[in-house]
Amino acid sequence: MCLWSMWSGSSGSNLSSVRDFCKRLQIPEHCAPLVEQALTHRSALAEGAAQSNERLELLGDAVLGLIVTEKLYTLFPERAEGELSRARALVVSRRTLAHVAKQLGVDQMLRLSTGEEAQGGRQRSSILADAVEAIIAAVYLQAGMEEARRFVWRMLGETIQRAPDASRVHDYKSRLQERTHALLRQTPEYRVLSETGADHDKTFCVQVRLGEMILGVGTGKSKKEAEQAAAREALERIDAVERSSHCA
C-alpha cells in the first residue's frame, strides 16, 4: 500500500507525512507544503487534488540542469565541452532520476489517481523523474539556490563525480560513430520506425543504418534512448563479426 493512501484522512495528516519525508531527506520543514504539491501527479486532479506538480517539474528541470552543469564545470576543468555535455545528460536522464526517486522513497509518496495507480504509474520512470524535478523546484522556491544545490548534491553527488567516465562507457552512439569512421569512413544514420503508446508514455523503435545496411534496432521511452539501444546492438554485432574473423 502506498503511503499516500494510508494518509487519506485530512489534508493535515497528509502534510504531516510530507514533513516526515522532508526531514528524512534533510529538506527544510517550511518547504513541506510545496513538496506536497511536487508529489502530486496530474491524474490526482480528477480525484480532488488542488494542484499538480507539472509547473514545478518544468522549473525543476531547469534548476537541476544548471546545478549539475555548474558542478561538472567546476569539478572537471580539463574535460571538453562534449564530455561535460554527455556527463550532464547521464546525470539528469529519466533513468537516473527514476532510480534516485526509488532510493529516496518518492515512489511511495506519490499522489496518483486510482486509475493511474492501477496502471503501474507508481513505477513509471517518467512520473518518478518528474516528481524528483518538482521536489528540486520546491526546495529552490522555498529555500533558495544554495539549499537546492545541497539537496541535489546529496541525491546525485556520487553520480556527478562518476558521470564523465560513465557517460563515455554508455555513449554507444559516439562509440559506434568512431568505429564506423575507422572501418568504413561513414557516419551511421538513425531512423524512427515506430512510435507506440499514449502521449505521456510513448515507446520509440529506432533503426541505425550505414547506407542500405541495417546495423541495429533499439527501443526506448525517448528517441535518444532508442538510438542508444540501436547503437549498442550495432556495436555488439560488429564485435561479434570481428571475433569470428579473428577465429577463422
Image: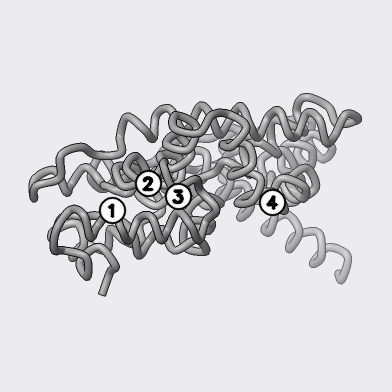
**Residue at figure coordinates x 28%, y 58% from the top left:** 121
Which of marks 2 and 3 precedes in the sequence?
2
Earlier along the polypeptide chain: callout 4 or callout 1?
A: 1
Q: Are marks 4 and 1 in contact (CB under 8 Å)?
A: no
The residue mark sitting in front, 4 or 1, is: 1
Is 129 placed left or right of 110 in the picture? right
Q: Which residue is mark 4?
A: 159
Identify which residue, 17 or 118, lies in the foreground: 17
**Which residue was labeled with disc 2?**
32
What separation in Å lies between label 4 and label 2 (alpha carbons)?
26 Å
Q: Earlier in the sequence, mark 1 or mark 3?
A: 1
Callouts 1 and 2 close, C-beta under 8 Å: yes
Q: Which mark is residue 220?
A: 3
Q: Which label lies toward us, 3 or 4?
A: 4
For badge 3, the amino acid type reads Gly
Q: Nearer the viewer, mark 4 or mark 2?
A: 2
